[in-house]
Image: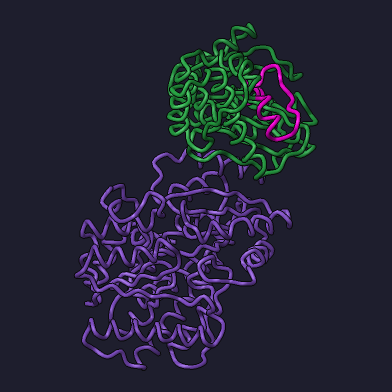
Amino acid sequence: MYLGVDIGSSSSKAVIINQAGVVCGEGIVNIGTGSKGPLQSVEMALFHASIERDEIKKCVVTGYGRLMYQGADKQITEISCHAKGVKFLWPKASTIIDIGGQDAKVIRVSINGIVENFVMNEKCAAGTGRFLEVMARVLDCDINELSGLAAKGKAGVIISNTCTVFAESEVISQLASGKKIEDVALGAHKSIAQRIAGLCSRIGIADAVVMTGGVALNHNVVTAIEKEIKHPIIRLEDPQAMGALGAAIFAREMDEGIS
Amino acid sequence: MFEVIGLIHELEAIGQNPKNAILDSMKKTGKKAVGCFPIYAPEEIVYAAGMLPVGMWGGQTNGTLSDRYLQGFCCSIMKANTEQALLGQYDFLSAVIVTAYCDTLKCVIENWKAAFPQMNLIPVVYPQNRKIQAGKDYMREEFERVRKELERITGENITPAALEESIEIYDEYRYAMQEFVELTQAHPILLNAKSRHLIIKAAYFMDKKVYTKKIKKLINAIKKLPEEETGKKKIILTGLIAEPDGLLDIITENHMFVVADDLAQETRQFRTIAPKQGDALQRMVERIAMQDGCAFLYDKDKTRGALIKDMVKKYNADGIIICQLKFCDPEEFDYPILKKELESEGIPSLYIEIEQRIDSLEQLRTRIQSFGEMLS
């Protein structure tokens, strides 16, 4: 059995695969690096796989907290791991948009799964999951409700896509001027989409485009990005776990002497 | 080997502690120091005046005093220099030469005049058309002005003989550095990214004659060592600077080394040497006229991309890291052209935005590690 752990800024993911590459266990905990999240996610995955820790032959850890995790055989970046995980499930993928808690990345992968190029957001949280968290707080709703809320909204509210702090002030101003919450939510999603489209234009897009990371769970954001980049986006069943899946595949390849 | 390690540690310590190194050099040589802003300050004239030209390349400051003069969108080198000057850290300098390559530097000159009225501030403006005769004549006049300013400060004439001797010292230093940077190909562990950078940087804080003697000693000692076989990936750095040092450590940690650079703080300082024609000032003028592929000197033919592509071929480099100092406009203007040229040749490149003080290097670590994974 092979374990992949993806320790992000706001969530921890663990995936266990067997020799054949079949996922046997998975754990996702919504707390990230520096917390008990990584260990909890691993325990959850071990429990689902009905195995003990010592049955893991190799472990690869990825994500923002990769260097803090004890007991890994190797640390590999989330860029390589997301590419590995996505190519495993969707071999035709050429462009991967990964939006996590504090980073947004666009990754270009070759036909044989090699990372050809990538771009990341700069320091600002605009265009990341943190932006959505801030928006949900200002709009007084749960982050899981944002997608449904935005789906009822009408286009027309424009929110800054360059700075989360400015965007927060803008949202408050828009609400104060009588704009509907759902319209503002849609505007916030468009703001993220524009930011991601900017990253995509720097690196170039090629089909198939696949989206990973926690923000991919928000279907309205995915739709907004599709409109901005003018390409359809493949929606995976479990976008959050792609990094951990890729890490588990790397662990298996290590054991087989491939990488 | 002990001699090599000793010399490397000595130069690294100087590169890491500019102020102490400058004060030490002043004490040992009995010379007064003149601060030289980046990038091509006419150091040879300062040296001919019997003074010590010292580099002013910012630092890791975190103060707010400079906010009075510089906006948040000014680069961290200018902010750090201004902050340190306001803190009195440069009070030991007899004069400061400020070059005017960008909008921020132009404003810095005026700001410093207002902030430090007691300071001997010598602005230098390089011509846009540095290759035509009128541009060269103008540049010579600028150098003559610097010479007169320094003569006024010291009360002594700068003789043609002193200028000739100075340019010979500087050319000898440049030839030695050209030889030094070639050594990293065979010694990527000994001359890892940080060591290489600090050894080159040390030259800014020492008497050039003393530094050249040391670097030649180091070169000769390294040449006697066996070549290192490492399989590390070969990287070329380009940009104004590649700091903080933590950035260079990340490159080393991820099995890469700097095989060559096109950094304004490093190789651009010594890759061009003017032929021995005319007097010292003429040779200084020619050197600036000949210097191409630099974002800070107008280059109508945009030769930087071709220059880097040639470097990739020469060193068989695996990739380029473009070190973009945040808010450095001249470098930013070059990037789209450079990116296009590298992409057209299929040369892998990584664009990173840096500041001299970065409190969290984690995002940079992810980028550089990913780039390393991409190349392997």
User: Which region of the structure is painted magenta?
Assistant: A222-245
Residue B268 appears at what percent x and percent y? 51, 69
Tell me: B109 left or right of A244.
left
Taking the image as shown, residue A83 lies to the left or right of residue B166, namely: right
Q: Which chain is purple?
A: B
Quadrant including the C terminus of chain B: top right
In the picture shown, does residue B357 fall above or below A139? below
Q: Is residue B340 magenta?
A: no
Question: Is the stretch drawn in magenta largely helix, strand or loop?
Answer: helix
User: Is residue A58 visible from the viewing direction of this image?
Assistant: no
Picture residue at 30% right of the left edge, 86% below the top:
B148
Between B194 and B216, the one nearer to me in the picture? B194
Q: Whole-percent x and y of residue B261? A: 55, 62
Residue B148 appears anywhere in the view = yes
Q: Nearer the viewer, residue A92 or A36?
A: A92
A229 drawn magenta: yes
Q: Residue at x 45, y 20 (%)?
A: A138
Q: Nearer the viewer, residue B373 or A240?
A: A240
Indicate the chain coloured green by its letter. Answer: A
Q: Return the residue found at the far front.
A: A178
In front here: A130 or B156?
A: A130
Give residue B171's position: percent from left, percent from top: 46, 81
